[in-house]
Amino acid sequence: MDRSALDPRLPLIQDADLENKVVLVRVDHNVVKKGRIKDPFRIDATLPTLYRIAEQGGRPVLMSHVGRPRDKKTGRITEDGRSSVLPIVQYLERKLDVRFTVPMIEAEGDEGIRGIGPSVEEDLRLLKERRIPGIYLPNTRCFQGEEAKGPPREHLASQLGGLADAYVNDAFGSWQAHASTFDVTRHLPSFAGLLMQKEILNLERVLEPRRPFLAVVAGAKYDTKIGPLRRIHERVDHLILGGVVYNAYLCAKYGIRVEGVGEEDVRAAEELVAMDRETNKVVELPAVEESDLPGSREEGRHRTRWVRDFSPGGRHARFLDVAPESFDDPGVSRIIDSARTVFVNAVMGFVPHFTAGTERLNREIAKNHDALKLFGGGDTLQELKNLNPGFYVSALDDPSCYFFTGGGTVLKAIEEGSPYGLEPVQALLENGGRGPEDPRPGLT
C-alpha cells in the first residue's frame, strides 16, 4: 500500500503500538438479511486489519451495525433476530478458527440498549487475560445512543471509549457521523484500518480519473441521489442511469408519467435534465422493459418500450429494467468501449425477476480491457457475482478492477469532493492518533 499517497495527517494502524492493548474496531459487516449472510465480501475485506491487530499483540473488540432495527418515524428499536450479529460471528469463527464472545446486554423494551453493562466488563477481563480471543459487541444500532443526539449519544461514546486503549475505524461503508464512527474518537487514540486506507486510495482514482470517465448510477429513489448526481455530472464525461433514477429522468425529459415514480422524484430529475442540455453527458439507453407486475415476470405482462416512441402526456406501467437491446446501440457501445475509467454503483433492474439489463451492462464493461473498473455497493457486487460470476471471480485478482465495500460512501465522497470530507475520516484527521480528551500520549 502506497501510504505516501494518503494525507500525512491520517493516523494509521501501522504506526500504533497495540501490544497488550484492547483495540475497539469499528467494521462494516452489514451483510445480514433475514438472519443470513448474503455475501461475506465486506467481512473478508476487514480480515487484513484483524490480522494486523493480532500480529501486533492487540486484543480486539469488534462492533458493526446490521440492518435498520430503529424505526425512523417512531424512534423505536426492535431486535427480532434479523439484525443480530450472530451470523457474522459464526462466519468469523469458521473463517478464523477462533471464538468471539457476544455479550448478552438486555434492551429496555423498544427503546434499545441503554448502556454497555456489567457483562461486558467480565468479558473484557477474560480478554485481557487472553482467556478469550475477541469480543463482538451487539448491533451498534440497537444502542439508544448510536444514532441519537445529545446526552444519549455522548453517553454511548464515552462508554465505548472506556472499553479499550485504542480505536480503529475500518468501516468505510459507514460514512454517517454516529457514536461508534465519530464521537468515540474523542475518547481514544484513533487510527485508520487497512481497509479504510485502501478505500481512500481507490477513491482518489474516482475523483482524479483517467479519461474518458464513465459513471453508471442507479437507485430506488431519485431524491436521495440528487446531491451526488449533481457532482458526478460535473466530473464525468459520460453518465448512464438505471432504476427509478432513469425512470425519473425519462419522465422529466419527455413529459411522460411512469407508475411508481413520484412527483418529487420527477421535479428533482428536472435539474439534471436542465444541466445536461448543454453538455449531453447523459447516455440515453434507447429501450426499457415495461411491466404490469413488479413482483413477477409473467408472459404477456411485460414488453419492450423504445424511448423514441415516447410522447408528452403518455402514461406507462413501471419500467423495471433497461432492455438488453440498449447496448446494441452503436453510440452506447462506443462510449462504454472508449472509457478509461468506469465507476458502477448500479443495478439496472428490479431483482430478482428483471436482471437482463444488469447482466448485459456488466458484460459490456468486462469487454473493455483498457479501462480501470471500479464497482461500489452491496447490491451492485451481489448482482455482479450472481449474473456474471466469471467476470466477478477474475476481477478479484485483476489490478484494473476494484470493489468498494460501500457504494453510498463513494457517492458521498464524490459529493464532498474528497474522501477526507467524510465525517468519520475527518474525526481521524483531527484526532491525530490520540483522543483529545485523553491526557495520555498517543499510542505511537
Image: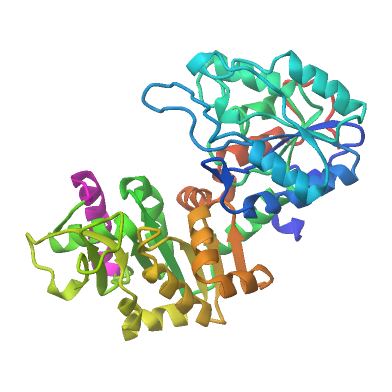
- Any part of residue 208 in sight: no
Q: Residue at x 57, y 45 (%)?
A: 36
- Any part of residue 260 in sight: yes
Instruction: Look at the image and say whether residue 265 sits in the magenta stretch.
Output: yes
Q: Residue at x 62, y 34 (%)?
A: 181
Compared with 391, 380 (above or below) is above
Compared with 101, 199 (above or below) is below
Q: Position of residue 38 (x, y in %)?
A: 56, 51
Which quadrant does the N terminus fall into?
A: bottom right
> Which residue reaches farthest bottom?
330
Q: Residue at x 77, y 50 (%)?
A: 95
Q: Residue at x 75, y 20 (%)?
A: 120
Q: Looking at the picture, tell me which residue is in the foreground, 378 or 290.
A: 290
- SS assignment for the magenta stretch, majority: helix
What span is colored magenta in the figure?
A: 260-279
Which quadrant does the C terminus fall into?
A: top right
94 left or right of 391 in image? right
89 left or right of 252 in image? right
54 left or right of 274 in image? right
Q: Position of residue 339 (x, y in %)?
A: 47, 77
Q: Position of residue 162 (x, y in %)?
A: 75, 20
Instruction: Look at the image and say whether residue 214 sits in the magenta stretch.
Output: no
> Which residue reaches farthest left?
313
Q: Position of residue 317 (x, y in %)?
A: 18, 58
Q: Looking at the picture, tell me which residue is in the foreground, 361 or 386.
A: 386
188 left or right of 83 in image? right
Quadrant in the rendering for residue 9: top right
